[in-house]
Image (cartoon, helix red, strand yellow):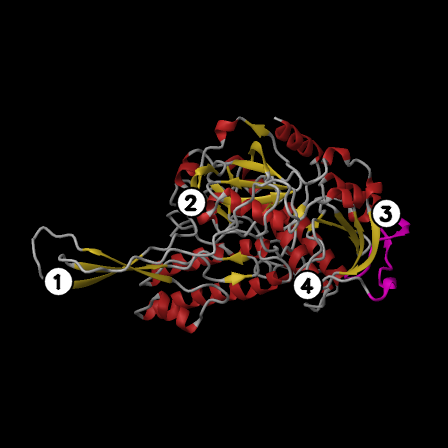
């Protein structure tokens, strides 16, 4: 009960909606440490809503245990660890959702069925008892300045959580520190006169600036204060918000956390037998076909003709938005290459497949996906099933291929959206030519039949797994386009504008920022009264 009250206090303080930016996760903690304390079952938000904990980790959810998730959060200096939907691991400093009855968290963990890993929209949360009580930290005087730090590493940002809800034009040191304190973050920093960042650790490649005078920009909301500079961060730290026993500190308790397993069981080998022996070879498509930074694409399905090829192209194109959202800066700049790869597939379908024979292997041989993993082949031996008694030893071989899990349920939507890309001659954007080349996310028919039949006929395809994409009823079609405009704006600011700041593009940071904001305003205006009339009247509308 004490643990639940402690997390409840943390939840009460979590009123700032922090936005995760560019985060390179640290290794899990592999040394013994004081065990996390179970704190309860919490709401993890409906699809498209804010989740309970701020960081959704990159850990493999297919072999997840409580020990693996907790060790990862400990190694990354987080106060809380959470598990949802059979094995999705989260870390965070505060809980932003409500405590639920315990029986609502009932899904077994994929790596240990005796443990519980949340529910469909619920999350089990554990707390590191080595952190000082967050409820006691109520004064920003806990933060002390630690100098001017660089923020131009190719490994990512110095601090990982940009406070997007704060008004840049009114930014002050106090405003930023208060936001980071409310989120439970021990590190806070201001940059470029009007940006605020929070974090639990300082990012790799970040150093104390050799010239402190490079933090020379006055805060937009208080000209007497300094708020960093171009690629320079005015950094503050609150020791009382950090663990008193970080990873590597010997625990006082004899209990330990089991480290993640490092070995796998080899496939069984054949033995002498008086019955026939069969060898089965299973080919499983890669779960990470194309990798950009922290993001991996789902594999596109096999094809044999133009129609099935276009289905694969559609699944490829619908994942572009999630690349820009999840890859992290500066890696997200390579999402343009992924979009180009999908474009090559479209051309392949319309030319090679239209002319005759075509297949996925022939396409990937010419245009190999980058950064991902190849398909895996597993071989197993066992006694062949037979109804005939025999003493003759024979050997047969059978090869099966596991069908790739599609990006979304059948049917596959076409990547043609209902919402309109706006036009503005001053800033040079128009349909097919958005700011920075970052397209408006697709809003089209909901491809999840049960959800469609419940009335949510439209879906915003912002995640590679369409089950996690927000859906909308017909009267709320304008809301879907509004959310698409917001998503495009977020990508424009976090990828294109940041790229301009570091010289990746020819436009200045100020002009890029103005173009992104103008496009967002125009996007809201041109889609304000969209109805989606005539679209998605049946489940198969707008689909291949």
The quarter of the image holding the N terminus is top right
Q: Which residue is mark 1?
A: 393
The total number of labels drawn is: 4
Q: Please tell me whether mark 2 or mark 1 is closer to you in this view.
A: 1
Along the horizontal axis of the image, is 373 left or right of 101?
left
In the rendered structure, does residue 159 fall within the stretch colored magenta?
Answer: no
Q: Which residue is mark 4?
A: 499
- Indicate the secondary structure of the residue bearing disc 3: loop
In the rendered structure, does residue 214 fall within the stretch colored magenta?
Answer: yes
Name the N-terminal-most of marks 2 and 1: 1
User: Which sits in the foreground, 243 or 410?
Assistant: 243
Q: Which residue is mark 2?
A: 447
The Cα atoms of the two marked residues, 4 and 2, are separated by 34 Å
Name the N-terminal-most of marks 1 and 3: 3
Residue 481, visible in the rendered structure: no
- Indicate the secondary structure of the residue bearing disc 4: helix
Residue 209, visible in the rendered structure: yes
Name the N-terminal-most of marks 3 and 4: 3
The Cα atoms of the two marked residues, 4 and 1, are separated by 65 Å
Contact between labelled residues 2 and 4, with CB atoms less than 8 Å apart: no
Dot 4 surroundings within 10 Å: few (below 14), some, or many (20 or more)?
A: many
- Indicate the secondary structure of the residue bearing disc 2: loop
The Cα atoms of the two marked residues, 2 and 1, are separated by 50 Å
Name the N-terminal-most of marks 4 and 2: 2
User: Magenta stretch?
Assistant: 210-231
User: Which sits in the foreground, 269 or 194?
Assistant: 269
Q: Please tell me whether mark 4 or mark 1 is closer to you in this view.
A: 1
């Amino acid at each position: 009960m004490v643990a639940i009250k402690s997390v409840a206090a943390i939840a009460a303080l979590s009123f700032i909606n922090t936005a995760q930016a560019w985060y390179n996760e640290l290794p899990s903690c592999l040394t013994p440490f004081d065990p996390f304390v179970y704190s309860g079952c919490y709401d993890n938000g409906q699809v498209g809503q804010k989740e309970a904990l701020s960081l959704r980790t990159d850990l493999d959810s297919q072999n997840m245990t409580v020990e693996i998730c907790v060790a990862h959060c400990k190694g990354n200096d987080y106060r809380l660890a959470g598990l949802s939907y059979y094995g999705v691991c989260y870390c965070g400093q505060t809980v932003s959702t409500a405590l639920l009855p315990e029986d609502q968290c009932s899904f077994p963990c994929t790596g240990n069925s005796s443990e519980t890993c949340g529910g469909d929209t619920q999350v089990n949360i554990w707390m590191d008892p080595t952190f000082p009580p967050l409820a006691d930290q109520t004064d920003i005087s806990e933060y002390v300045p630690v100098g001017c730090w660089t923020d131009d590493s190719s490994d990512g940002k110095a601090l990982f959580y940009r406070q997007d809800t704060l008004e840049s034009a009114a930014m002050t040191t106090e405003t930023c520190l208060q936001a980071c304190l409310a989120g439970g973050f021990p590190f806070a920093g201001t940059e470029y006169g009007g940006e605020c960042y929070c974090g639990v650790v300082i990012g790799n490649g970040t150093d104390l600036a050799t010239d402190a005078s490079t933090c020379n920009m006055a805060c937009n909301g208080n000209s007497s204060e300094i708020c960093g500079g171009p690629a320079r961060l005015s950094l503050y730290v609150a020791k009382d918000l950090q663990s008193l026993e970080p990873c590597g500190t010997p625990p006082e308790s004899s209990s330990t956390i089991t480290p993640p397993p490092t070995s796998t069981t080899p496939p069984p080998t054949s033995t002498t037998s008086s019955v026939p022996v069969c060898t089965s070879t299973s080919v499983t498509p890669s779960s990470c076909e194309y990798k950009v930074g922290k993001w991996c694409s789902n594999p596109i399905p096999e094809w044999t003709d133009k129609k099935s090829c276009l289905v694969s192209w559609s699944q490829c194109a619908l994942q572009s938005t999630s690349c820009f959202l999840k890859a992290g800066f500066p890696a997200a700049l390579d999402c343009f290459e992924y979009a180009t790869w999908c474009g090559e597939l479209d051309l392949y379908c319309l030319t090679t497949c239209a002319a005759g024979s075509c297949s996925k292997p022939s396409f990937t041989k010419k245009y190999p996906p980058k950064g991902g993993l190849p398909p895996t082949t597993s071989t197993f031996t066992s006694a062949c099933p037979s109804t005939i008694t025999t003493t003759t030893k024979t050997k047969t071989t059978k090869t099966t291929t596991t069908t790739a899990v599609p990006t979304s349920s059948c049917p596959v939507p076409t990547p043609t959206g209902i919402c309109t890309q706006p036009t503005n001659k001053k800033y040079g954007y128009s349909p097919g030519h958005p700011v920075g080349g970052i397209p408006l996310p697709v809003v089209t028919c909901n491809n999840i039949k049960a959800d469609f039949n419940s009335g949510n006929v439209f879906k915003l395809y912002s995640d590679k797994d369409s089950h996690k994409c927000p859906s909308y009823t017909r009267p709320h079609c304008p809301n879907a386009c509004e959310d698409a405009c917001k998503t495009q704006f977020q990508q424009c600011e976090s990828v294109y504008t940041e790229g301009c700041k570091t010289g990746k593009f020819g436009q200045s940071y100020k002009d890029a920022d103005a173009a992104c904001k103008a496009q967002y305003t125009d996007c809201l205006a041109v889609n304000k009264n969209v109805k989606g009339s005539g679209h998605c009247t049946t489940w198969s509308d707008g689909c291949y």
